[in-house]
Image (tube, helix red, strand yellow):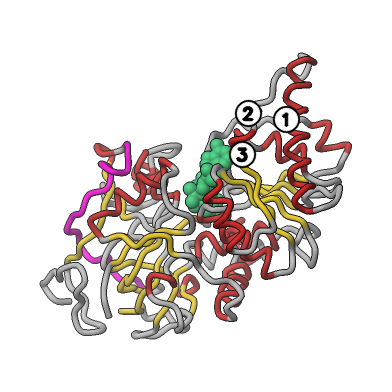
Amino acid sequence: MTNQIYPIGELPKIGEIPSMMHAATIRQERYGNPLKAFAIEEVPVPKVGKNDVLIAVMAAGVNYDGVWAALGEPVDIIKQNQRNGYNEDYQVCGSDASGIVWAIGENVKKVTVGDEVVISCGTWNENQEDILLGKPPMESVSSGIWGYDTNYGSFAQFAIVKEFQCYSKPNFLSWEEASVYMLTGATAYRQLMGFSPNKVKKGTPVLIWGGAGGLGAMAIKITAALGGIPIAVTSSEDKSAFCKSIGALGSINRKKFSHWGRLPDIKNQPEMKLWTDQARRFLEEFQTIIGKKQKPEIVFEHSGEDTIPTSIFVCDTGGMVVVCGGTSGYNADVDLRYLWVKQKRLQGSHFANPSDCQGINELVMKKKVIPTVSEIFEFNDIGIAHQKLLENTHKPGNMTIKISKK
Ligand SMILES: NC(=O)c1ccc[n+]([C@@H]2O[C@H](COP(=O)([O-])OP(=O)(O)OC[C@H]3O[C@@H](n4cnc5c(N)ncnc54)[C@H](OP(=O)(O)O)[C@@H]3O)[C@@H](O)[C@H]2O)c1
């Protein structure tokens, strides 16, 4: 350990660990708009425990969990993490990274100092009883998201992870490209491939909300790579054009409809009729794009309250609406009549198991999925990037932060 702090962009000799580092932190007194919530501070480099891997972060992808952490909603993440044993009164967010293995704990076997890796944000206790009994790790009581449910994520010069979070970095990708696909890619992969029998096969029609966003763009690319038919929803013609350029068969502009949000009172027939007319018109747009009277077998959801009623309505008999977020709100109405009569499934999904991370990494390695970096930001601009995400003013694809150079 050297008693030093290195300027952003510089690193010590490989394996040397400075005592302090630059990190973008969030503190409770700054909770609110990301622009103000993130600040650059000097903090201690985290200690490397027996099972830990210290990563020198090269680039850090920007994701929505940084927005939720900054807002302090729906969870006061600092309070939660202190309850779970972290001592710090600040949080270092960042749940996507590419970087170099800088140090390893004595029990670490699968990676070695100098390895170039991409980090998955799913973390858990491998010795947790439910995992030892065969539960998928993301369903374990010990599961959480690195950089959100744990401190010392990727918005710093160094980050702490477990060895099972490390995947080989595709050598043909830049650090920035390698930093943007694991969180959204593995989340989307699980949504599309993790819930049998509703998995993408050749010809599976998939409706994808927010097709130009981080998750949606990945869902389009994965669906297309697996032979399915991705049809996107966006809020502008520019974003629709982007979706088509990355493999969507077509795109629906949601601004042409106004039935978003909670359902009207189901007993109010005139109101319900107005709602159903719009939902039906939305389905007809989907069918015009696909060219037949087919409904989506999988509806890829994360927009939440505004869109779930429509997702349930348009989903095919025996199909699945698979949801991993609620950007527009959490009080999502489900008209149960459509759910049970047509035997649809509303499936929750949260990040990804190792097989999903492996799945997306293989697609990227084989160049079947190419990550889209929308914008590269300097370290000081982490707040600006998250503010854009909150205001939905970011460019299509995924944003990333440049941190260190090799
Ligand atoms: N549970 C998990 O593991 C997990 C993982 C990743 C993300 N998430 C969650 O998933 C959500 C999306 O993440 P992301 O990274 O894809 O964010 P993103 O890049 O901002 O993309 C989301 C897209 O949703 C669309 N959208 C926004 N408000 C909408 C509304 N009211 N109705 C319909 N569409 C709307 C926007 O597209 P248009 O304006 O073009 O329609 C936007 O591009 C976030 O809430 C995030 O927390 C969860």
CB atoms of marks 1 and 2 within 8 Å:
yes
- Name the kind of residue labelled 3 in the image: Arg
- Residue holding disc 2: 258
- Which label's residue is closer to the chain start, 1 or 2? 2
- Is 33 a magenta residue? yes
Residue at the extreme right: 341
- Name the kind of residue labelled 2 in the image: Ser
Which image quarter holds the C terminus?
bottom left
Which type of secondary structure does the marked residue at label 2 adopt?
loop
Q: Nearer the viewer, residue 238 or 341?
A: 238
Q: Which percent across, then down, holds residue 255?
A: 59, 36
Above or below: residue 361 compared with residue 297: below
- Residue holding disc 3: 254
Label disc, if present, on residue 278 of the rendered structure: 1
- Whether residue 388 is visible here, answered yes or no, is yes
Q: Which residues are magenta?
A: 32-49
Residue drawn 34% across the image and 73% down it: 55
Horizontal placement of 62 versus 271: left or right?
Answer: left
Label disc, if present, on residue 120 of the rendered structure: none
